[in-house]
């Protein structure tokens, strides 16, 4: 499968490399070593997938251009996605003597890649980093595009920077251990991507997911359909890389990638307050449907669009019903980090492949929805 590039004009900022097996990450690391001293790699790994870090380490031991100089485990939870954890990574790197030629390799899902990328971006004013994403969500979304960061003061991803990884290495094998609930969370972001830029992928992704939803042996379904899944991941990664290459710092087109996210972040905030267990991807699926309802009520989409979309997503096994009334999301939405002077850039859609930005206050949006 062909590499995908993140570019700025003619300049390549980063690449997305597709391979099979964890050993494939080592040649990608070697390419970062250049011709000088061996590359010093500091791994930041989700403790749930510690075994993958061990495998990378044993493969790296067979190559003299790559030296693993540190291996730090972290607990990948939203509560732990905070500045203290980032500072503990930079503290360990300092103690281990990491210099400005260090490369941080994040192994894990979006929580891990967001934090490791941020730690690398502030350590000694910035060292290189690369990602080995181990969730579907991070393979199609979080590990692409360079947004790094942590939660702050109960708001999601409030502190962070945009900085591109040297590479993102995608291999399907790591998804075999991923719990199905987390797999479906990632599927929400994949479907979101295809709703933004369709090209027939929206229907293909829902057909794939509907097969999974009805399969008796879901693990086996995923194993038997790895190739189809990889093609979908490649397509979603291409869409995201294209948008990011055209608008890295989110001054325009990149805002479209936030489809469903203003609602999702507010849903996640409510969930934390109420002690409810809702993953980011689940909140995104609910947020997409809320965006569709808002699109219908503001006249952008035809009547019936939102309920048809909700039915399609539900049949694909995605959660579509937000458990909270729209009014209770308004305050959190107004404090969305992308809000400007109280105006929120809502991403609306008229049909798959046609999304538009509509500016309104959070309470206006809540009014349309209630
Ligand atoms: N930077 C971005 O552009 C961007 C985009 C979307 C989402 N995000 C962020 O990503 C985060 C969500 O990412 P996620 O869904 O990947 O979550 P995650 O990192 O929390 O991973 C989900 C769960 O799966 C476990 N896990 C990871 N890989 C596994 C594997 N292969 N086998 C078994 N268990 C595994 C983790 O320990 C965790 O319990 C959120 O914090 C969100 O804000 C960032």
Image (spheres, grey):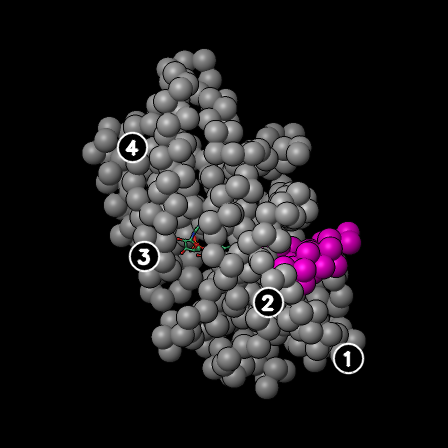
Q: Is residue 256 above or below residue 45?
A: below
Query: What residue did someone put label 2 on?
Result: 318
Query: Which residue is pictured at 63% across the width and 82% down the height?
Result: 368
Query: What residue did someone put label 1 on?
Result: 303
Which quadrant would the N terminus be assigned to in this image? top right
Query: What residue did someone put label 3 on?
Result: 80
- Measured Cα–Cα span from mark 4 to mark 2: 38 Å
Image coordinates of residue 149 in percent, x first then y, are 41, 51
Image coordinates of residue 111 in percent, x first then y, are 41, 52
Question: Disc 1 vs disc 3: Cβ atoms closer than 8 Å?
Answer: no
Quadrant location of residue 49?
top left
Question: Disc 3 vs disc 2: Cβ atoms closer than 8 Å?
Answer: no
Does residue 20 appear anywhere in the picture? yes
Q: Disc 2 or 1, which lies upstream in sequence?
A: 1
Prevalent SS, magenta region? helix
- Measured Cα–Cα span from mark 3 to mark 2: 26 Å
- Measured Cα–Cα span from mark 1 to mark 3: 42 Å
SS type, badge 3: loop
Which quadrant would the C terminus be assigned to in this image? bottom right
Image coordinates of residue 347 in percent, x first then y, are 64, 65
Q: Which residues are magenta?
A: 189-212
SS type, badge 2: loop
Quadrant location of residue 202?
bottom right
Query: What residue did someone put label 4 on?
Result: 70
Q: Disc 1 or 4, which lies upstream in sequence?
A: 4
User: Is label 3's Cβ within 8 Å of ligand 1?
Assistant: no
């Amino acid at each position: 499968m062909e590499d995908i590039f993140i570019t700025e004009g003619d300049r390549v900022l980063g690449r997305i490399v597709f391979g099979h097996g964890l050993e494939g990450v080592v040649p990608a690391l070697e390419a970062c070593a250049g011709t000088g001293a061996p590359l010093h790699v500091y791994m930041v790994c989700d403790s749930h997938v510690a075994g993958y870090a061990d495998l990378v380490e044993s493969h790296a031991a067979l190559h003299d251009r790559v030296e693993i100089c540190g291996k730090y485990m972290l607990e990948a939870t939203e509560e732990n996605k905070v500045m203290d954890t980032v500072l503990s990574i930079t503290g360990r790197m300092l103690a281990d003597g990491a210099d400005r030629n260090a490369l941080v390799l994040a192994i894990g899902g979006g929580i891990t890649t967001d934090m490791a990328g941020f730690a690398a971006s502030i350590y000694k004013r910035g060292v290189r980093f690369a990602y080995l994403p181990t969730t579907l969500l991070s393979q199609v979304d979080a590990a692409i595009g360079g947004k790094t960061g942590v939660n702050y003061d109960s708001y999601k991803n409030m502190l962070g920077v945009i900085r591109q990884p040297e590479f993102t290495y995608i291999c399907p094998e790591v998804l075999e251990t991923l719990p199905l609930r987390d797999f479906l969370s990632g599927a929400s972001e994949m479907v979101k991507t295809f709703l933004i830029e369709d090209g027939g992928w929206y229907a293909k992704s829902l057909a794939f997911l509907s097969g999974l939803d009805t399969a008796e042996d879901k693990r086996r379904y995923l194993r038997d359909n790895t190739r189809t899944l990889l093609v979908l991941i490649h397509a979603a990664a291409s869409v995201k890389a294209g948008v990011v290459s055209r608008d890295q710092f989110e001054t325009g087109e990149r805002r479209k990638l936030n489809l469903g996210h203003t609602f999702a972040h507010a849903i996640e905030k409510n969930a934390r307050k109420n002690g409810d267990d809702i993953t980011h991807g689940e909140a995104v699926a609910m947020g997409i449907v809320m965006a569709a309802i808002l699109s219908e009520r503001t006249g952008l989409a035809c009547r019936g669009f939102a309920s048809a979309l909700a039915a399609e997503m539900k049949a694909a096994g995605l959660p579509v019903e937000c458990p909270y009334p729209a009014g209770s999301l308004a305050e959190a939405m107004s404090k969305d980090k992308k809000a400007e002077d109280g105006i929120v850039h809502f991403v609306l859609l008229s049909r798959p492949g046609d999304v538009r930005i509509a500016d309104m206050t959070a309470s206006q949006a809540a009014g349309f929805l209630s």
